[in-house]
């Protein structure tokens, strides 16, 4: 019986593909298994249109009467076959774009492919004025100023030229080459409202989903979640700024070697939106509790401390927020990019366990 | 027998996926069938590193001694299961990036997904200083000057606000919204050598493949193919400039409403590289043979005329180049973007037939 089936299988499988083989193929954590998609694509969402005064005339030079569509987000999506209900919407941090979630600097699969394999629809964002969402309605100058040794430190790979001991980043020079090249400049002034507007417009378009933020988009993510109830949960990797507190409950400004870190006051009404969804925050390793003379370390010391106060505030008002400092659960050596570090599959397990406990998968 | 097989099929298919169902699934022109990939990812390739004078010191502000990795191309790839031998490398035109080949402005599949479905490995390029390859080693200003009515005309959608009759572009306003938003600015000076260097480095990395160019990258594509024998064929959609001729054979400069169009002299040695590979050029509709008062039409009149002289030159020296003016083969209404027009599946058939005739598939 089995042998007979094997002979006719290619024909039958081709005919019945949607019903039989495919759903099994996509629920996989094995990077050598096929990736099976129902569909994939990209689109722009949100944004605005500006128009120059005057009248456009065919063949006349100059902007008179012409339009510019800009300040949208760019979105790339993949929908696996037999998808889970809620999509993951992944939003990069400062100086980065959707690449954050793609192939890791050392060439392994990033969170985009890892979670598509686990049957989550995945949407990657380029926020307005970044990467493929480059059309800005406001002019800007790109300085091309060398700054990578500072990022090496701020992203907690180490203190140039030394890696921190045990850091989860490949020592192959090509990994660092790829890592530096995944940065992109702002093509217009960095504008939080423009960014949050576009991401909220994305959830308006696709409906309920789970927002994954990183670093600078952490603070923007709280803004988006306060605005749009289609954001059903937030997973925030190393949020770096923009912690919102109810008026009257903003903690004292913290100071570090990289400057002051202040909370942002919002109305209790706004804040309460954040108490109605599950939230998890992850921080990596090499974040001290005491002041450090290493700016990269000291910068994240106050951010982790502020995040702890923030989680307390959310939960004090009836919320469901959790902070996971990865070394506390035995996951060590992570940089500012836990989702692309050498142990990113372990980090993915953490995130999927959170989604599972919150019944979001 | 069939009924029995159906019952055990899910198990067998899951077990034998690589051997049975998957190869059939990917060789499909049906947009409702699953897309089955062996792998996907992204990387930076080529580029340079600049370093500021001075010494970097931890925590000290400013560029002293710091590096900037820039001027690379960004590449996104998908390898289908059971892939054809030669990958397609798709290179966007002026003001565009990899989005050119993704979802069409009206929301259908573009050449990326169409050809992955047909089992071609597909690589999409963002050329240096564009889109996700935004890190430039040279500073630049982004003007944010409204210019879309001019592009509406230059890309041969029509003479604003009117579409050309029968044009293969959706009249749904959202299609035009998406179309305008797929443009991105240069994040550094447009530099042909920098772009060709990075694309040549890509072929160095991935080995033999077929280069697909569009508009501005048409001319850069000849440069890349003269440099790198790993480029085994070129498919060029509406090349707009940079036609290379052997010294002494450069045709007279042509003039149009949008300015002069001159050929570029190269050595006979360089030129002969282009006679050793199959080349096809496609142009769409609404390109007149006589001068026109519509700049969009007149611009492409001279480009099509120059391309004809170019194909003649290649073939005169023993090459295998062909120019297909799509209306001549009954395919009408195409804009400057035939691969994303409403009839792009018909255009894909043309391209695949070329690859098949040249035994490149």
Image (tube, coloured by chain):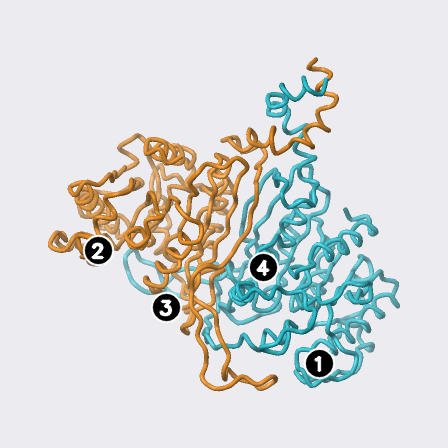
Chain colours: A orange, B cyan
Q: CA distance from mark 2 to mark 1?
A: 61 Å
Indicate which disc residue A189 carries: 3
| Contact, mark 4 vs mark 3 (Cβ under 8 Å) | no
Q: Secondary structure at mark 1?
A: helix
Q: CA distance from mark 4 to mark 1?
A: 27 Å
Q: Nearer the viewer, residue B13 or A161?
A: B13
Residue A132 visible, this angle: yes
Of labels 3 and 2, earlier in sequence is 3
Residue A262 visible, this angle: no
Q: CA distance from mark 4 to mark 3?
A: 30 Å
Chain letter, disc 1 residue: B
| Contact, mark 4 vs mark 1 (Cβ under 8 Å) | no
- Tag in front: 4 or 1: 4
Q: Secondary structure at mark 2?
A: loop
Indicate which disc residue B106 carries: 4
Q: Nearer the viewer, residue A315 or B56?
A: A315
A152 left or right of B342 in image: left
A233 left or right of A63 in image: left
Let me know if marks 3 and 2 both belong to one chain.
yes
| Contact, mark 2 vs mark 4 (Cβ under 8 Å) | no
Kindly indicate the quadrant of the structure image that contains residue B329. bottom right
Q: Secondary structure at mark 4?
A: loop
- Tag in front: 2 or 1: 1
């Amino acid at each position: 019986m089995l042998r007979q089936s094997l002979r006719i299988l290619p024909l039958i499988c081709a005919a019945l593909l949607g019903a039989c083989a495919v759903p099994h193929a996509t629920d996989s954590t094995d990077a050598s298994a096929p990736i099976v998609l129902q569909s994939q694509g990209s689109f722009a969402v949100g944004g605005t249109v500006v128009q120059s005064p005057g009248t456009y005339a065919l063949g006349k030079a100059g902007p008179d009467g012409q339009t510019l569509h800009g300040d949208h987000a760019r979105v790339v999506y993949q929908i696996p076959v037999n998808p889970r209900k809620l999509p993951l919407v992944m939003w990069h941090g400062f100086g980065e774009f959707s690449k954050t979630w793609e192939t890791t600097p050392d060439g392994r699969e990033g969170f985009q492919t890892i979670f598509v394999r686990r049957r989550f629809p995945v949407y990657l964002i380029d926020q307005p004025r970044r990467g493929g969402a480059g059309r800005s309605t406001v002019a800007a100058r790109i300085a091309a100023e060398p700054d990578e040794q500072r990022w090496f430190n701020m992203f907690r790979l180490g203190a140039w030229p030394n890696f921190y001991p045990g850091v989860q980043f490949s020592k192959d020079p090509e990994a660092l080459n790829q890592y530096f090249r995944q940065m992109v400049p702002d093509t217009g002034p960095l504008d939080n409202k423009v960014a949050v507007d576009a991401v909220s417009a994305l959830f308006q378009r696709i409906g309920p989903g789970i927002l994954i933020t990183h670093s600078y988009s952490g603070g923007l993510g709280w803004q988006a979640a306060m605005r749009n109830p289609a954001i059903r949960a937030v997973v925030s990797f190393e949020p770096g700024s923009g912690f919102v507190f109810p008026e009257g409950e903003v903690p004292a400004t913290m100071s570090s070697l990289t400057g002051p870190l202040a909370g942002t006051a919002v109305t209790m009404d706004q804040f309460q939106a954040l108490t109605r969804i599950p939230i998890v925050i992850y921080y990596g390793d090499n974040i001290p509790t005491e002041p450090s003379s290493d700016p990269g370390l000291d910068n994240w010391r106050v951010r982790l401390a502020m995040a702890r106060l923030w989680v307390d505030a959310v939960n004090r008002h009836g919320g469901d927020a959790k902070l996971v400092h990865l070394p506390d659960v035995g996951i060590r050596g992570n940089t500012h990019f836990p989702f692309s570090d050498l142990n990113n599959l372990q980090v993915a397990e953490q995130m999927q366990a959170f989604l599972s406990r919150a019944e979001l998968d």
